[in-house]
């Protein structure tokens, strides 16, 4: 197979193991920078058989990608189990009854023997495994196993008592009567199996593969044979195993586990085996390590040559899997390589380094790629005294240095080589002050324009975080030239940045937003006025290159239009079509209606959004223009029509407040306060109307088994609190994420409570919203010939509203109509006028919001408000 133009001419061995994997001596080869090539290092004179010195800190517990993947899969299986048990309750009951009937057809002695065996294994295996861990002094494993078993038991008990109880066959307990065994025939229960499965998962990182497989085989065997012996319901057995995977993985993620990486001694042995005369190997400090990109070592040969060694393992494959999945979900054309083994990834990176060097760019000089015992691999490059560009102090981050880095980027871009992780931490500055590109693990040959443009956008954004948009653009212009720099314009958008770069830019914008609020108690906010680094960079690049405005490249796989289209299709199929059956009755009622009174209902829709706007303006720590906020409220009402629980509207309001520059914690507190105020206003208004209408709450009895849900809820809350408060990652999460959010929310609430104007505006909004809806219903009823005192009408509306809020459908669709019709007819309104009035009222106040809100959503998007 021929090679591409410009591709380095490597022999097969060089393609597999680097430019020179075999010892070759007698060749005095140096590159144009005077650095040693691999032929001068691999196979050089050794140390006379002396063992290399290895310096590495004790292994640290880490949160592994494999545990996160197992947790996600287990949660999906758990959700499927609950869905089968709840949504197909009758089918699940019949299917499990059939399985139990088949099991009871076995000879009784055989079933008792199976049950006795399962009980013996279930008793002895956990005790033996725990004893082995204690004897081997694996106390770190024991500290994970015991909490995991407790959490698994709690979740298993909750699952079997709530979700799976109704799906069990009615005759199942009778099957256990008269059965033999070591203990009660219903043991081991699903709760006990869930605890055992959780313990096996939590102990897995400390166990060898044979032990892990043996314990899993015993656990799964106990569940299978327990179901076969009819002592356990099949769905309960499967749920117990799934709960084990969920609880055990959650504990490992919170408390950490041993890294799935080769030890430093194995890395040193691999370097010696590949022919490098290793004298010293030292793991670099934590601040030099990059998460998900292997472990970096500094090495020195017997002849004094400095090397950088990057050790890859299965853990990096797991993290790269999540990276590729995220890109495939978010992007239209992710162009990611397929799954690679650690050795395959190391060989790919080495080849990309060789190709990048042939383009004329300054890159880290490659030495060799070689496997490590246990499934890992190493990539070796020359030089370990270089510092990453991200670690340089501000005074050393000169324009000349940045311009040279951009010149190296220009070289690889000319040959269509995409780096695909182009950030300052992947640009090394050597002792002579020259920058070198490194970390080509995700590099791509013959890259498409969107990948090359995303490279430029990522480096522009991450350098602008340090030096500002204007200086970052000037340095890029000096190294790239105006024509190539302008190609980055369509990709200066957040979606072009995934992972660390995107988070870095978000933190930068949040810091600028906080600085803007420092020292000001109240300020006038501008919709869409939040600091936006990507927008500032686009303006700087357009000005520097004298280029026209470029439309953002369509990178997203899903857009607002596609998501709303799917939601609208769901709404039509499942919610709207049944409502059309009432359309003929509504049309007939309109013939005899008083049109002047019906026209009076139309302003109710606009007044409702006005009260919603007042409520939002009264719950934010700043001043917003009424007009823009009113438009956003109309857009939110449209999203509330297609999402249950007003989730869509709350998300849009949160985005709107964030785009104005309000901190995330304060914006979330504001949206939460609006929801709370709405709930309180419904209760207050309902209480007033019920009291005025002479209603008594004592006649209303809600049959809710509170005790059935209280204890499981308490157990789960205590378990979650224990994981957060008793584990270092949990405490770090509380310290770094939860407490700052609560402080921001508390500051917001304190500022609002101290402002009488805000309180008055919020009260007007929260009380006016339900009252204007009652007025609209009264006008509709009067227009269609119905007559009912306003107080009784308000009581009927609020009772129907409270019941409809509990229905998991957008806007209480269907539930509110049924409640209103039932309430009006119970109060003496004839069925015909009551039904027609409710249908016309919903047409003018609910469905009229759909076209108006869709128009408003498109408008606020174009204006950059959301």
Image (spheres, rainbow, N blue to C red):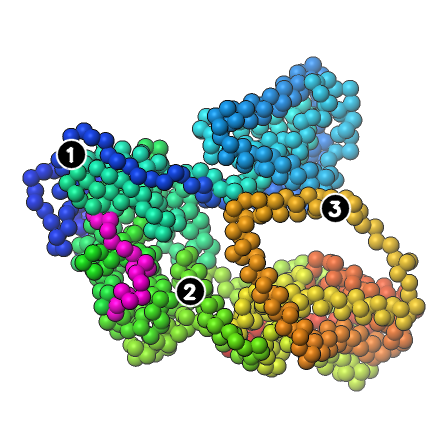
Q: Looking at the picture, does residue 139 appear above or below residue 717?
A: above
Q: Which residue is mark 3?
A: 709
Magenta region: which residues? 382-399
Figure quadrant of the N terminus: top left
Front-lying residue, 228 or 357:
357
**Residues packed near mark 3 inside 10 Å, few (<14), some (14 to 19) or many (20 plus):** few
Indicate yes or no whether the magenta region holds residue 613: no
What is the spatial separation of the Cα atoms under label 1 and label 2, in whole angstroms?
A: 48 Å
Q: What element does badge 3 sit on?
A: helix
Q: Is residue 243 left or right of residue 793?
A: left
Q: From the top left corner, tell me how far across and down residue 839 is, in percent.
A: 78, 70
Residue at figure coordinates x 90%, y 71% from the top left: 692
Q: What element does badge 2 sit on?
A: helix
Q: Of circles 1 and 2, which is in front?
A: 1
| Labels in figure, total | 3
Residue at figure coordinates x 84%, y 67% from the top left: 687
Q: Is residue 49 left or right of residue 255?
A: left
Q: Which image quadrant for residue 844?
A: bottom right
Indicate yes or no whether the magenta region holds residue 383: yes
Q: Of circles 1 and 3, which is in front?
A: 1
Mark before the other along the chain sequence, 1 or 3: 1
Residue at figure coordinates x 60%, y 31% from the top left: 196
What is the spatial separation of the Cα atoms under label 2 and label 3, in whole angstroms?
A: 43 Å
Q: Can residue 740 be seen here?
A: yes
Q: Which image quadrant for residue 805?
A: bottom right
Q: From the top left corner, tell me how far across and down residue 270 is, in percent.
A: 27, 34
Q: Which residue is mark 2?
A: 505
Q: What element does badge 1 sit on?
A: loop
Q: Which residue is mark 1?
A: 46
What is the spatial separation of the Cα atoms under label 1 and label 3, in whole angstroms?
A: 70 Å
């Amino acid at each position: 197979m021929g090679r591409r133009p410009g591709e380095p001419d490597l022999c097969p061995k060089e393609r597999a193991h680097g430019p020179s994997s075999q010892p070759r001596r007698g060749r005095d080869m140096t590159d144009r920078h005077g650095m040693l090539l691999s032929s001068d290092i691999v196979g050089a004179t050794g140390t006379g058989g002396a063992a290399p010195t290895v310096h590495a800190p004790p292994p640290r517990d880490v949160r592994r990608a494999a545990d996160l993947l197992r947790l996600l899969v287990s949660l999906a299986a758990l959700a499927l189990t609950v869905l089968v048990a709840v949504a197909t309750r009758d089918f699940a009951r019949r299917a499990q009854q059939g399985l139990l009937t088949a099991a009871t057809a076995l000879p009784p002695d055989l079933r008792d023997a199976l049950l006795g065996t399962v009980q013996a294994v279930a008793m002895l295996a956990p005790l033996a495994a725990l004893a082995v861990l204690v004897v081997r002094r694996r106390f770190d494993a024991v500290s994970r196993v015991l909490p995991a078993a407790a959490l698994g038991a709690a979740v298993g008990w909750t699952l079997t008592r709530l979700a799976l109880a109704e799906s069990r066959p009615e005759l199942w307990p009778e099957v256990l009567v008269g059965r033999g065994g070591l203990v009660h025939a219903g043991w081991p229960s699903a709760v006990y199996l869930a605890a055992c499965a959780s313990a096996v998962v939590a102990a897995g990182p400390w166990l060898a593969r044979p032990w892990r497989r043996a314990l899993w085989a015993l656990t799964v065997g106990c569940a299978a044979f327990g179901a076969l012996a009819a002592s356990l319901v099949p769905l309960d057995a499967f749920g117990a195993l799934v709960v084990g995977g969920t609880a055990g993985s959650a504990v490992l993620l919170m408390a950490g586990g041993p890294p799935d990486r080769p030890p430093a001694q194995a890395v040193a042995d691999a370097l010696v085996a590949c022919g490098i005369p290793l004298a010293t190997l030292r793991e670099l400090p934590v601040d030099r390590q990059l998460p998900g990109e292997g472990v970096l070592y500094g090495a020195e040969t017997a002849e004094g040559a400095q090397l950088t060694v990057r050790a890859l393992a299965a853990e990096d494959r797991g993290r790269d899997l999540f990276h590729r999945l995220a890109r495939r979900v978010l992007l239209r054309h992710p162009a990611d390589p397929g799954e690679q083994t650690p050795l395959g990834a190391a060989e790919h990176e080495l080849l990309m380094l060789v190709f990048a060097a042939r383009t004329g760019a300054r890159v880290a000089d490659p030495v060799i790629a070689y496997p490590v015992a246990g499934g890992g691999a190493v990539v070796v490059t020359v030089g370990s005294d270089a510092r990453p560009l991200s670690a340089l102090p501000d005074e050393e981050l000169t324009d000349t240095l940045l311009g040279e880095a951009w010149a190296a980027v220009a070289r690889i871009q000319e040959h269509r080589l995409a780096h695909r992780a182009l950030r300052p931490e992947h640009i090394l500055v050597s002792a002579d002050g020259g920058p070198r590109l490194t970390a080509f693990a995700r590099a791509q040959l013959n890259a498409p324009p969107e990948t090359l443009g995303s490279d430029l956008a990522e480096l522009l954004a991450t350098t602008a975080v340090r030096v500002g948009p204007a200086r970052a653009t000037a340095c890029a212009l000096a190294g790239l030239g105006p024509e190539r720099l302008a190609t980055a314009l369509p990709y200066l958008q957040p979606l072009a940045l995934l992972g660390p770069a995107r988070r870095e830019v978000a933190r930068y914008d949040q810091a600028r937003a906080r600085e803007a609020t420092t020292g000001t108690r109240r300020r006038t906010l501008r919709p869409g006025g939040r600091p936006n680094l990507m927008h500032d960079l686009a303006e700087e690049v357009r000005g520097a290159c004298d280029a026209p405005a470029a439309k953002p490249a369509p990178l997203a796989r899903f857009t607002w239009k596609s998501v709303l289209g799917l939601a609208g299709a769901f709404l039509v199929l499942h919610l709207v079509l049944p409502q059309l059956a009432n359309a003929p009755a509504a049309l007939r009622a309109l013939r005899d209606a008083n049109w002047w009174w019906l026209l009076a209902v139309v302003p109710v829709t606009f007044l409702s959004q006005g009260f919603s706007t007042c409520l939002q303006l009264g719950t934010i720590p700043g001043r917003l223009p009424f007009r823009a906020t009113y438009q956003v409220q109309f857009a939110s009402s449209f999203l509330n029509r297609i999402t249950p629980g007003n989730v869509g509207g709350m998300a849009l309001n949160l985005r709107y407040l964030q785009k104005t520059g309000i901190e995330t914690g304060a914006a979330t507190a504001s949206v939460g306060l609006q929801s709370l105020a709405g709930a309180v206003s419904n209760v207050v208004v309902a209480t007033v109307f019920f009291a005025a209408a002479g209603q008594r709450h004592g006649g209303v009895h809600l049959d809710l088994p509170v005790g059935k849900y209280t204890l499981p809820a308490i157990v789960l809350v205590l378990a979650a609190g224990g994981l957060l408060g008793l584990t270092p990652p949990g405490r770090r999460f509380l310290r770094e994420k939860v407490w700052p959010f609560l402080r921001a929310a508390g500051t917001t609430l304190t500022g609002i409570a101290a402002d009488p104007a805000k309180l008055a505006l919020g009260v007007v909004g929260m009380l006016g919203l339900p009252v204007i809806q009652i007025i609209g219903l009264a006008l509709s009823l009067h227009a269609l010939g119905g007559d009912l005192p306003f107080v009784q009408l308000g009581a009927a509306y609020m009772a129907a509203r409270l019941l409809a809020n509990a229905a998991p459908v957008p806007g209480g669709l269907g539930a509110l109509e049924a409640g209103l019709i039932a309430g009006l007819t119970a109060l003496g309104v004839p069925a015909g006028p009551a039904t027609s009035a409710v249908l016309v009222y919903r047409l003018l106040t609910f469905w009229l919001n759909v076209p108006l809100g869709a128009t408003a959503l498109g408008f606020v998007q174009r204006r950059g408000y959301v």
